[in-house]
Image (spheres, rainbow, N blue to C red):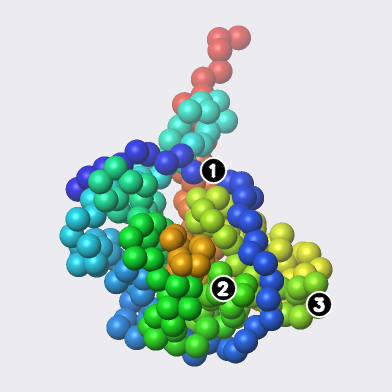
Amino acid sequence: MNRGFVWRCSVSIGAALACLTPVLAQAQTPAQTASASSPEMAGIRLGMTEAEARAAIRAFDPALRITAVMGVFDYSDGVNHTLKTPEFLDRLEAVKGNQLPTLKVYFSGPVGDVRVIGVHRTEILASNPPTAAQFAQSLINQYGRPAGVNGSNNAHIVWESAGRPSCIRARNHANQVAISVSSGTSLMESSAVEQFYTKRGSEITARGLLPADLAQCGAYVDYNLIGDPVRQFVAELNDLGAMVAAERSRTAWVRQLQEAATRARQGRGQVPRL
């Protein structure tokens, strides 16, 4: 297994929001599972194991080089502030040649069953780029009718999973409930997902639109088509509820390690001779 650099987990709010547009229709996508009926991106489905995701990437493009990016958290026992958790699989990155990663596949864990919870894809179409209409129609043929479209040239096209609460809707300037997704760098790298959506839920544009428990949030597919003809696109397949659950699990895991280290350090404490 190729091992990439170790990513030191951090918390920040950095995901920008796409422009808001009215919702066109409710998507008819089934709940996100690693089944043949769930949405896929480059052959990768939510709920896949690492082995399944690797096989899907190889089947999609054998020329892609797959690297595992490991995560690690820093913590303290109250005296030693340089303690580190064991490394865990944060994501797989797939690269062709010397280019930037074409695919990033994010995983839950390290606690419990480690599964795909998000896919980020970006690609430059250097030769024979399709028109925005051609690209959009191809996506509709694959995913069905979208939940929302933003921009005259189909700049953002979004699909939502059915059966779970939507967490990617907010009110626009006309007070209409609209699709509102993160844009650019994946949420898993640029934000603490629960913190991001908790903050959004407290704002007037999204107040009352999010579930009380963000771990219930549904999944979505977002394609951002850049230019017409489309010379670049950025796409994401995210299970927001699973991302929130993974963050909570990791926080609890680090807290347990920290509490155990603190107890061990305290157990070794020695009172000086009096």
Residue 210 visible to the viewer: no
Residue type highlighted by circle 3: Ala
Residue corresponding to mark 2:
153
Residue 208 % position (x, y): 76, 76
Instruction: Count residues near mark 2 (Cα–Cα under 10 Å), then give few for <14, some for 14-19, many for 20+.
Output: some
Q: How many marks?
A: 3
Residue 152 visible to the viewer: yes
Q: Earlier in the sequence, mark 3 or mark 2?
A: 2
Q: Residue at x 64, y 50 (%)?
A: 13
Q: Residue at x 33, y 76 (%)?
A: 34
Label 3 to label 2: alpha-carbon separation: 21 Å
Residue 105 % position (x, y): 37, 59
Residue type highlighted by circle 1: Ser
Of residue 88 and residue 48, the one placed in the foreground of this image is 48
Residue corresponding to mark 3:
174
Residue 78 % position (x, y): 57, 30
Residue 11 % position (x, y): 58, 46
Mark 3: which secondary structure?
A: loop
Residue corresponding to mark 1:
10
Q: Residue at x 51, y 36 (%)?
A: 75
